[in-house]
Image: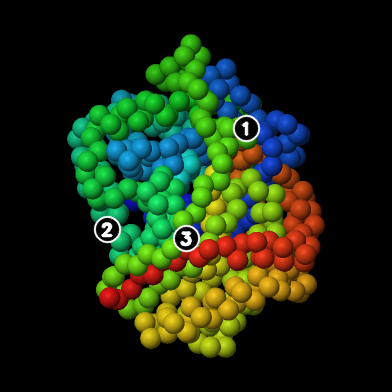
Amino acid sequence: MRPTHQPGPAGQQSAAGRPAALAASPVPSLTHAPGATPLPPGVRRTVLPSGLRVVTEHVPGVRSASLGVWIGVGSRHETPSLHGASHFLEHVLFKGTAERSALDISVEMDEVGGEMNAFTAKEYTCFHTRVIDSDLPLAVDVLGDMLTSSRISDDDVEAEREVILDEIAMHDDDPDDVVHNLFAAQAWGDSPYGRPIAGTEESIAALSAAQVRRFYRRHYRAAGTVVAAAGNVDHDEVVAMVRRAFGRNDFLATESLPAPTPLAGAAARPAVRRVHPGRSTASRGFEQVNVVLGMAGLARADERRFALGILTTGLGGGTSSRLFQEVRERRGLAYSVYAFTTQHVGAGLVGVAVGCLPAKVDATLATVRAELAQVARDGLDADEVRRGAGSLRAGLVLGLEDTGSRMHRLGKAELLGERLLGVDEVIARVDAVTVEDVSALARELFTRPEVMAVVGPA
């Protein structure tokens, strides 16, 4: 009912941990802390006395409004005994409040044709909705009620536990999810970055209702929350709605401000986590063998991220890319092959994912390695860099025609302490990438030690 897939920019992950293909996504827009420089046209920002931040973007010519509440906690913040708690809590907050039952929440949104969902990532949780502009007050009130006043009863926790276990089992039947989870575990080991976002059967079975409630009280605080809205919205009106809707249960009280979330400023960014090279395998009764081959990449704030976007697009981001042409078109080794990048605040990976028949694994791997070696040695040519830049520009501009994409861009940048770049500024940075920039980055990344995950028949 509420799948936890993460739409939006490249490098973000679903609850199962699978990165999104870079070429289909806009470029992340970040550099400095919010407020350090002027905001792009149409964007406004207010910080309430409690620390809760409201950021909006007025989009002319639309009659919709997309709203997201971003909480600065994700699976990265979990201890082993709380593995899966962020995702578990995301589910439970839909189960009802003192004012609304779970059915009431669904009925109120269905009556106005609103779309409502949520997702959990490594570094944050987001609850989001899209409605007609006139129904925005209802959407703000419903999300405010859910986020500040959830019951989290023992019965609700037990009922949702079974749903989450079914979701984990569903992901375990998906070859892509399994291989990307295995890849992350090999790369980052038994650390918060290496564990699956949804948890495991064992960790979810062990979580108690009391633990989930404590996790809620500890992390769902105003100072770690961002409310983002985009579309036909008025900033001052949104701020007034947020004050009313989030004023329940002293959520906006200032007497005992919690410490800012670790993600709320560039000065608090952790060092980039070390990647462990090696190979992991898992046997599954799938028809194909799924392989992810990669190495340490770049963290989110790295200024070379624009060159990285062009590099991975030229390598394996579209039908004209090297990997698609060599692996699929010329050799017929696999139906699906693509390059990807995963970028977190303190960690990054870059790699290639491919699925093929068992008899073709050796030839496929040899071809992928040969292409990586050639790009590491020679880089991309000028035409490939031009096509990669064009793909990133188009992904950004086309994505921003949707109010939901704009809301995601606003909320994520604000929550993670990143400066929101204007569209023209992002395009200028993409266009400034040179062939030499891409070649130097390819040389650095694709000569790093390999991390590999293989899933398929025994």
Left or right: residue 37 versus residue 110 is right
Q: Tell me the residue at 40%/52% (across/down).
A: 189
From this view, report whether residue 420 is shown above or below residue 295: above
Question: Residue 238 at what x, y percent from top left?
Answer: 58, 29
Left or right: residue 94 versus residue 122 is left
Element under disc 2: helix
Element under disc 1: helix
Q: Which residue is mark 3?
A: 277
| Quarter of image, res 367 | bottom right
Label 2: few (<14), some (14–19) or many (≥20) C-alpha neighbours in 10 Å: few
- Note whether residue 176 is visible: no
Q: Tell me the residue at 24%/50% (across/down).
A: 201
- The amino acid beneath tag 1 is Ala
Q: Tell me the residue at 51%/74% (across/down).
A: 337
Q: Which residue is mark 2?
A: 169
Report the disc number at residue 267.
1
Instruction: Please tell me which residue lies in front, 107 or 311.
Output: 311
Question: Residue 185 at what x, y percent from top left?
Answer: 39, 55
Label 1: few (<14), some (14–19) or many (≥20) C-alpha neighbours in 10 Å: few
Considering only order in the chain, which callout, 2 or 1, is on the residue closer to the N terminus?
Answer: 2
Label 3: few (<14), some (14–19) or many (≥20) C-alpha neighbours in 10 Å: some
Question: Residue 342 at what x, y percent from top left?
Answer: 53, 55
Pointer 3 with pointer 2, Cβ within 8 A = no
Which quadrant does the C terminus fall into? bottom left
